[in-house]
Amino acid sequence: MNLQQNIPLKNYSSYKIGGPAKFFVEVESVEELKEVLRLARLSALDMIAILAGGTNVLISDEGFDGLVILNRIGGIIEGEGSNLTVGSGTLVSDFLAYCTENSFSGFEWAGGLPGTIGGAIRGNAGAFKGEIKDAVVGVESLDLKTLNEKIRNNAECQFAYRNSIFKSGEGIYEFITHVILALSLGAKKEIEEKIRQKVDYRNNRHPMDYPNIGSIFKNIPLNLLSNDLQKEFSSIVKTDPFPVVSTTKLLALCGLKGRMAGGAMISDKHPNFIINVNNAMASDVKALIEIAKQTIKEKYGIFLEEEIVYLD
């Protein structure tokens, strides 16, 4: 275990934004994780944050005045049938490469998705009418306070739209360690082609030339809107995986493309992305988030909900 101090977290963020962690450590196994947590308990370190891919989190300019644990738990183990047990720190891109090489189908929708498997579970990542919950058999986790290991089945994870028990329920104080996924065997070339199509789609439509953390806001479930708004927005409804109004289209309709604050900008290519164009600060990004939320609220009476999470 290599416990470090005052480590710049921007180096572990796809945004290239974030101040230092007072304490910082990487873990590659459940045993290492337990060792770190025991040390934290002995040292009275009760402020603990988990970081993995750094692709869906906005880290504050001040950093984190506690212990940041970087999740590097990897490994893929084949089980019964086409079940795979995947280390939560495994990059989605690495998992897709494994699936392609070994002809496992059912995860192609995630082509081009950044981040790790654990992060995808926490936020129930989804795209192209698919969600990770559709493949989940079970999730293994470790309670950060008691060090008790838990395993939940799909229903117990309480998956919802870009949400789970680990993001807003009793599991928020748990460290996801492994995920059991049920896939199926398929044709390697077909799997490869489907993944390539998804990657190309993202590259063509997302502002990949600048540091970003993906979509800032969730789309808006159609059934939460009034009948009048449902009619007004009928042309910008999509399935994700149920009918939603595209937040990207709403932001564009409000003329927010290209809006800047400091070194951050609402992307003119995909306005649900706020990009780091010139050494942006977290405060710049937060300013644009508030501008977007206030603009949509004033014009349509709709409250946007962030898909990203904050580390501060």
Image: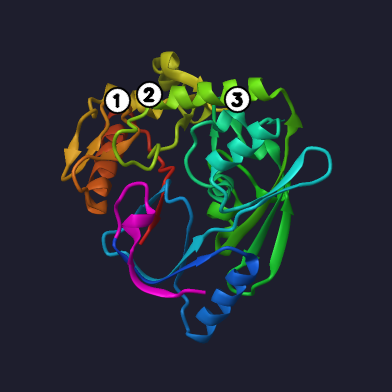
In the image, is 188 to the left or to the right of 240?
right
In this orientation, which residue lies closer to the viewer: 253 or 99?
A: 99
In this orientation, which residue lies closer to the viewer: 286 or 183?
A: 183
Q: Is residue 13 above or below residue 241?
A: below
Q: Which residue position holds label 2? A: 205
Other-residue count near label 1 (Cα within 10 Å), few / some / many at <14 / 14–19 / ≥20: some
Other-residue count near label 3 (Cα within 10 Å), few / some / many at <14 / 14–19 / ≥20: some
Q: Earlier in the sequence, mark 2 or mark 3?
A: 3
In the image, is 138 to the left or to the right of 3?
right
Query: Residue 298 in the image: x percent, y percent?
Result: 27, 33
Q: Magenta residues? A: 1-18
Q: Nearer the viewer, mark 1 or mark 3?
A: 3
Query: Residue 195 in the image: x percent, y percent?
Result: 56, 26
Q: Which residue position holds label 1? A: 269
**Amino acid type, residue under disc 2 in the picture:** Arg
Tell me if residue 215 can be seen: yes
Q: Which residue position holds label 3? A: 192
**Distance between the alpha carbons at the discs numbered 1 and 3:** 27 Å
Query: What residue is shown at x 56% (from left), y 64% (from top)?
Result: 173
**Amino acid type, residue under disc 3 in the picture:** Glu
**Distance between the alpha carbons at the discs numbered 2 and 1:** 7 Å
Quarter of the view holding residue 63: bottom left
